[in-house]
Image: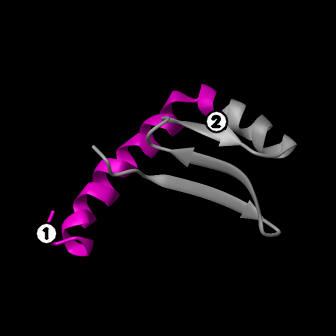
Amino acid sequence: KDIQYIKSIYYNKLEIIRFTSSLGRYVGYTTYGVKNAERWNKDTSIIAVKKAQRETYCLHNVGIWYPNM
């Protein structure tokens, strides 16, 4: 439960948008990022794919990176 999937998008060394599995939605940090976050959060298929990334990527690889877990 403490494993988190985070996808951040940067432009010119500035984080503009982030998806985190703990929130289950995108968060925008700039005007452009906020507009895209609102648009992407409305699309349930995009959110479902990102939530599934936690299961397919993070939980699958946790045994490789942390063998004692």
Per the model, the C-alpha gap separating discs 2 and 1 is: 36 Å
Which mark is first along the chain, 1 or 2?
2
Q: Secondary structure at mark 1?
A: loop
Q: Is residue 48 magenta?
A: yes
Q: Position of residue 36 (x, y in %)?
A: 74, 39
Q: Main secondary structure of the magenta part?
A: helix
Would residue 61 be found to the left or right of residue 44 on screen? Answer: left
Q: Check the image and report above or below for 58 versus 27.
A: below
Would residue 60 be found to the left or right of residue 4 on screen? Answer: left
Q: Amino acid at mark 1?
A: Asn
Residue at 16%, 72% in the rendered image: 67
Q: Secondary structure at mark 2?
A: helix
Q: Nearer the viewer, residue 66 or 54?
A: 66
Q: Check the image and report above or below for 56 versus 25.
A: below
Quadrant of the rendered structure where residue 65 is? bottom left
Estimate how packed mark 1 is, as few (under 14), some (14 to 19) or many (20 or more) residues with alpha carbons within 10 Å: few
Residue at 22%, 70% in the rendered image: 66
Q: Single out the residue that lies furthest toward the left.
A: 68
Q: Amino acid at mark 2?
A: Trp
Q: Give the quadrant of the N terminus.
A: top left
Mark 1 = which residue? 68
Mark 2 = which residue? 40
Q: Position of residue 2 (x, y in %)?
A: 31, 48
Residue at 86%, 41% in the rendered image: 31
What range is drawn magenta here? 40-69
Number of the front mark, 2 or 1: 1
Q: Is residue 47 magenta?
A: yes
